[in-house]
Image (cartoon, rainbow, N blue to C red):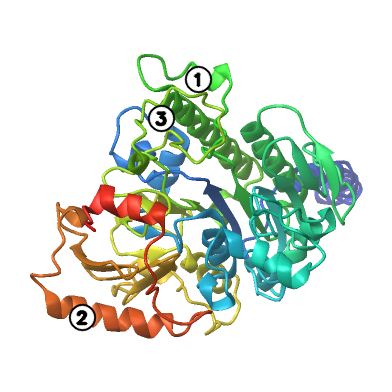
Amino acid sequence: MSYISMINFMSNILLPITALLLTPLAALYAADAPRPAGKPNIIVILTDDHGYADLSSQRQVSDIKTPNIDRLASRGVRMTAGYVTAPQCVPSRAGLMSGRHQQRFGLNNNAEAPMPLDEQTIPKRLKKAGYVSGQVGKWHLEPNVTCVKWARKNLPELTPSKNGRVAIPGQLYRTYSALGQGFDECFQGEMDSYLATFDCDGNTLDPHGTIVKQSGYRLETQTAAALAFLKRNHDQPFFLYLAYYGPHVPLEATEKYLSRFPGEMPERRRHALAMLSAIDDGVGEISDALKKYQIDDNTLIVFTSDNGAPLAAARGKPKADLRPVNNSSADWDGSLNDPWVGEKGMLTEGGIRVPFIMCWPGRLPAGKVYDQPVSTLDIAATAVAIAGLQPDSKLDGVNLIPHLIGENTQPPHAALYWRFLNQAAIRSGQWKYIQAGSEGNYLFDVTSDEHEKQNLITKHPAIARGLALKLSDWTQQLAPAGDPDHPLSLEEKKWYFHYLNMTD
């Protein structure tokens, strides 16, 4: 046999054997191989009552430590004028989840929940594009104990208690849960009781949801559940909505996080810093998981808050409040809204201007700071666009990606609008106009150093009139329609007397 013939003979024998031996090894590596680039994953991380100042990348305060969230900003875009749709939990979350002004479907404040079941949410929309969706943490779009008006209409057999609250039947919490609003999986809850379709190890539970009692620190539990969702679904396009219950009261932190913030400070501040540090650790673990599954370059992460921090300053309560930090009343939660004026519940910047970061390595520019006004309404429109779905004119937000990468150099919005309780506001360009019920109107240049510390309405009456007309036209589209022309409530009066020097 010639040398060439022998080589061919050996090749015919050895190559199939080699291929057979290598097949299991190839399969092993294939299991860890990155998923082919296609529809991007989307993760929305929402904090609760988290003020604008409290990310170290915002450069407003020196005591905050958020290196992992800062890393999102350094790898993506930090938006300095990010707004929510309301300065309160329920309406703000409804606007984010629907991508529409929540007043269009009558959800004006916490007492006007739940979000209607026929509303098109982000997970309902993404399901049409083949996404699996998961919700973890605080939901807060089901009926709650303050929904007396809704209960009288839908549950006439219920009698409100003397304090004006109603006991909502447990089944309705399930009906209006994240599962009832389009999510495929959930680990829904705030403290130690969760409606769950999977456990923190990634094991499947009842697909209709079962109540899980989970001991441990609530923020670590919520991170663990998010990681379990990624473990279960990283090999397909997914949407994860992780709504941390922090730094909302009751303040809670373990020594692991409290010890990171020694020194003299109000205990409420220390606990808020510790809670945000726990959330920051969670963001780091999620980022590590995306790298482990080799999908970080194919995942858009949005980080923001539902509204500004409650400061209780208008009630004459000092920030160094000495009451127990686990007090769940609506007092200062330890977070800060610097440099903005006001707090949760107000349509001043302190109530509605929040941290806002988008990170999508390779798609969004790294380390960019974007100063044009954007809204949590834009999250749904952006998700629809990058999932390859057709635009929907019913959405009130816009796809931010072309603006953030410089393809579209125009501002995303000609104007942003708000109506909450007896307040309404519009921001257009540098100008912001606030209607404080029937008792006061304000015009501010929010891009100036004075921002909402100087009312310019007498200096620029024509600008104020023009903005007031636009605002009035917008409020006619809402349910109920119209400007908030009633007097401010007692709580609202306290806010405006304290922060904007309103007089009787």
Amino acid type for the residue under numbered disc 1? Leu
Q: Residues within 10 Å of mark 1 (few under 14, many from 20)?
A: some
Q: Residue at x 68, y 37 (%)?
A: 191
Residue at the spot of label 2: 465
For residue 258, which numbered disc appears in the image?
1
State the count of labels: 3
Is residue 112 something that shows in the picture?
Answer: yes
Q: Where residue 178 sits in the image (x, y, percent)?
A: 72, 58
Marks 3/2 in contact by CB < 8 Å: the verdict is: no
Quadrant of res 193: top right
Q: Residue at x 29, y 75 (%)?
A: 410
Left or right: where does residue 26 sit relative to residue 291? right
For residue 65, which numbered disc appears in the image?
3
Lower sequence index among marks 1 and 2? 1
Nearest the eye: 40 or 384: 384
**C-alpha span from label 3 to label 2:** 43 Å
